[in-house]
Image (cartoon, rainbow, N blue to C red):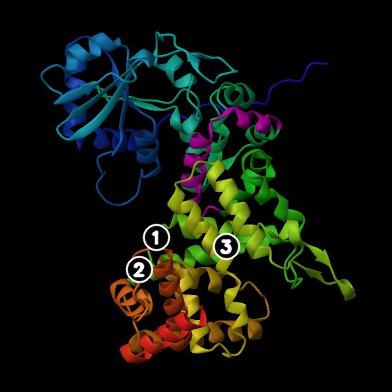
Amino acid sequence: MSVEPPRRPEPLPVPPAVQQTVRDLVEVSPVLVELGRRFTAAGHQVHLVGGSVRDALLAAGSAGAPVAPGDLDLTTDARPEQTLRVLRGFASSTWNTGIAFGTVGAEVRGERVEITTFRADRYDRESRNPEVAWGTSLVDDLARRDFTVNAMAVSLGPDRTVTDPFGGLGDLLARRLRTPGTAVESFADDPLRMLRAVRFVAQLGLTPDDEVVAAMTSLAPELGRITAERVQHEFSRTLLNPAPRAALELFVGTGLADVVLPELSALRMEIDEHHQHKDVYTHSLIVLDQAIALEVAGARAGEDGVASPDLVLRLAALLHDIGKPATRRHEARGRVSFHHHEVVGAKLVRKRLTALKYPKDVVEAVSRLTFLHLRFHGYGDGQWTDSAVRRYVTDAGDLLPRLHVLVRSDSTTRNRKRAAALSATYDSLVERIEELAEAEDLGRIRPDLDGNRIMELLGISPGPEVGQAWRFLKELRLERGPLAPDEAEAELLSWWRSRA
């Protein structure tokens, strides 16, 4: 028995008010107006497509004048060589890096423009490379795009007509994410579109329809065909949105995470040691939510070292507990422990983020935050010595503002009394840090003697022994705070003699 494909909504007519919104969008960009005039004079169609049209339609009816689009993505019936002729004498520069795919890049009056010939591509499903074929109509070109909300266009000709053949406007109004054709065909052509679906959930607040979710779930293994760099780029863009949680739940729920970030999926079955949450996965999402809230608040308040959005902090909040599955132990009385999960987690973070081609500085920062996120719990009721406080600050280094946010966010207990106590205890640690910082330069803890004085005092030349002496003095400085020069010299000489 054959199964009928799901019924697709009929495209809604574009209301006059929405038409006017998009027309105004074009009018506020002198570059678009002039490009439309030049292509029309040459006998060609040219249309603004993609995110600019989508975002203008989203803004329809909102207060305020339309803002000129940032990314100018155009499509035309002109072939690349004809586009270059239209741009001659108008564009300050052009580039042909995408010309094999029909795209001419240009800079016009300081704005970057990409103009692509109508296409009707088919994809090689092994390599994901399109078999480039020129299209004959705008609708054919829009049909090959990823989602209906991106398959709309506005003419730059005199009529400024909005073209919406696949119901993208209706999907925007319904906050629905669909593909122009069948989702299976679309994702099989280009599996990266599944990660773009995840991103659009976070970026636009759209909900994928059942067909899209089913296709993502069945085709999730195909994501393995995508390069790590492209996966990392889309995942990072998702994470940097104001509220990425629903998108991450889609990422995990469809099995995409199993392919590219399996450590995140593994957290779903790991009950945390406090039995306050259904699983560590849920806890991690709450930590991320709380970290974003604190990050945004800190950035607005102008706190030193706090920026928003912060990729390093968000990765650390999401992944700080990924060492728990490997360290879970069942203890007496039904308790569960995860001893040293911060150590294991730091190693897993480094391995996974390296595999995803994150920059080395990002990898090291997220790994260090993962390693340090439990350190505070040794503080107890404030029993740390000044030496321990110095080490906390020194080990965190320039990550200290992020560590503050991560540690505070990691408290997800529903017990208000316990939550208040943890917050007050961390407040007391921050106060201790600030008090010590006033008396000492905690941000630049160095030995009380420099390398030249060490060599002069010990009568040695540059070499490994100077480094050993320097590290001894650094430990001494951390343990006892600043020393007078004569006291530091006496301690160094005593250490040196003890080595003989």
Residue type marked 1 = Ser
> What residue range appears in magenta?
218-244
Q: Is residue 221 magenta?
A: yes
Residue bearing mark 2: 300
In-image side of 212 versus 103 (left or right): right
Q: CA distance from mark 3 to mark 1?
A: 20 Å
Q: Which residue is mark 1?
A: 308
* Residue 26 screen position, x and y as percent: 24, 33
Q: Give the residue type that dot 3 points to.
A: Thr
Question: Is residue 125 visible from the viewing direction of this image?
Answer: yes
The numbered dot on residue 370 is: 3
Left or right relative to 363: residue 137: left
Contact (Cβ within 8 Å) of mark 2 with mark 1: yes
Residue 115, percent across and down? 30, 21
Query: Mark 3: few, some, or many residues within 10 Å (few <14, many ≥20)?
Result: many
| Mark 2 to mark 3 CA distance (whole Å) | 25 Å
Left or right of 280? Residue 83 is: left
